[in-house]
Image (tube, helix red, strand yellow):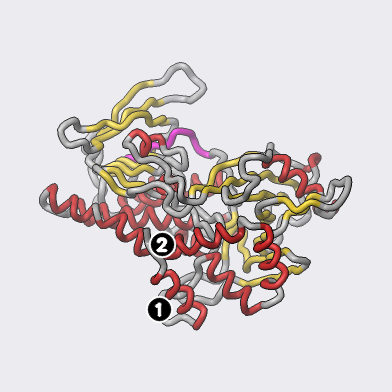
Amino acid sequence: MTEPQPLSEHTADVIVVGAGPAGSTTAYYLAKAGLDVLLLEKTAFPREKVCGDGLTPRATKQLVSMGIDISEEAGWLRNKGLRIIGGGVRLQLDWPDLAAYPDYGLVRKRDDFDEQLARQAQKAGARLYERCNVGAPIIDDRTGRITGVHAKLGDPDSKEKRAVTFHAPLVVAADGNSTRLSLAMGLHRRDDRPMGVAVRTYFTSPRHEDDYLESWLELWDKRGPGEDRLLPGYGWIFGMGDGTSNVGLGVLNTSSSFKELDWREVLKAWCASMPEEWGYTPDNMTIPIRGAALPMAFNRQPHYTKGLLLVGDAGGMVNPFNGEGIAYAMESGQIAADVIVQAHARATPAQRELALQRYPKVLKDTYGGYYNLGRAFVKLIGNPKVMKIATQRGLTHPVLMKFTLKMLANLTDPTGGDAMDRIINGLSKVAPKA
């Protein structure tokens, strides 16, 4: 296939704002299909992002589809499954054997991970601008459609910045939870959707080569005085394979303590309760504790309006069951690219618009029912009593926990799966998709 010729330096078929997993995946598939794509990233690579760094088989599948080298020689650490700890039980569950997904996950630091995806998009033909801070959208007064963006090029810490405008008939907002572009287009967050917060840090630790992702359903503060205190939220420990562990916690706004507590202090209290030999002590911390929001279950809609498509966190794509965002960021990017490519081939504006209107419908068909099940799940576990019963009784039943793993990680074969797959797929189909 011949390389697409740029329409001009600052003009393209599509502008993608944000080079995280959602933006880079969108740009990759658009460029691969022959469209001219501008990928605008406000920082420079490598850059830090708050994340657990653990990838399920769902995200692994996306990396394989993009042609990323995921070998151990290329610096990826594989994991076999999920270890769940809670209610006095420690249960190790392997990722399921499925035709649709690999039977292993991966771990990779986000600064390096995001850069790999952005460079892959560049190799496919996308034009990447780093240190490009996008501001207001350019809107056609006559139609109300977005036709480009205003931006400033240059080091964020420098006073020397150059104002530029970029133009394209379609713009993809992949600018994360804060998504200034969506807000400027009048798309605000829905308060009836769950929101999470994640905080994490890294410790040098002998557990760095653990080949299971570890999830703690109970967080105990054992610092005293008095009885041990059960903290809200869930915790994780992911070995990074580089001498460090990523240790963090997530909490949902369904918890009564959501706004009251200092989550950095909660993380410190939890780490203080762990065995000393693991090394999760202040002296072994390699970076400060940082936090980020987890926008869940389509908390910003519509996902397409007036020339703007939302992908990843900008569209609230985080899985409410488990806080996973990367797989859904990449999948939504691929779906958006496919819709845009089809629309681009239509002859008239009306036909192009008809094709673009399909994007939110495909998202709802793909995730709507499952995310609504997740919303119900989130309300339940926001109640500490329900969580206590679930951990004490549920974790002692391996068959039930295998079902729960498939449900929480959204790992089923869409056709020809086992009875568990059929139940989960059936529940997702009958659940409302709003």
- Label 2 is placed on what type of residue? Tyr
Quadrant in the picture for the N terminus? bottom left
Q: Compare residues 198 and 261 and report the one nearer the observer.
A: 261
- Label 1 is placed on what type of residue? Thr
Residue at 27 percent of width and 56 percent of height: 339
Q: Quadrant of residue 150?
A: top left
Could one spot residue 402 in this view of the protein? Answer: yes
In magenta segment, residue 41: yes
With 210 as the anchor, is 196 left or right in this view?
left
With 410 as the anchor, is 271 left or right in this view?
right
| Cβ atoms under marks 2 and 1 closer than 8 Å | no
Label 2 and label 1: CA atoms lie apart by 16 Å
Residue at 80 percent of width and 44 percent of height: 281
Residue topped by disc 2? 367
Residue at 85 percent of width and 46 percent of height: 223
Residue topped by disc 1? 415
**Between discs 2 and 1, the one toward the N terminus:** 2
- The percent position of residue 24, horizontal first and vertical second, equals 41, 47
For discs 2 and 1, the disc positioned in front in the rendered view: 2
| Residue sitting at the far right | 225
- The percent position of residue 60, horizontal first and vertical second, equals 50, 62
| Count of numbered badges drawn on the protein | 2
With 65 as the anchor, is 169 left or right in this view?
left
- The percent position of residue 258, horizontal first and vertical second, equals 62, 44
The 10 Å Cα crowd at callout 2, few under 14, some 14 to 19, many 20 or more, is many
Residue at 37 percent of width and 39 percent of height: 17
Magenta part, dominant SS: loop
Q: Compare residues 277 and 432 and report the one nearer the observer.
A: 432
Quadrant in the picture for the C terminus? bottom left
Q: Compare residues 199 and 231 and report the one nearer the observer.
A: 231
Magenta-colored span = 38-46
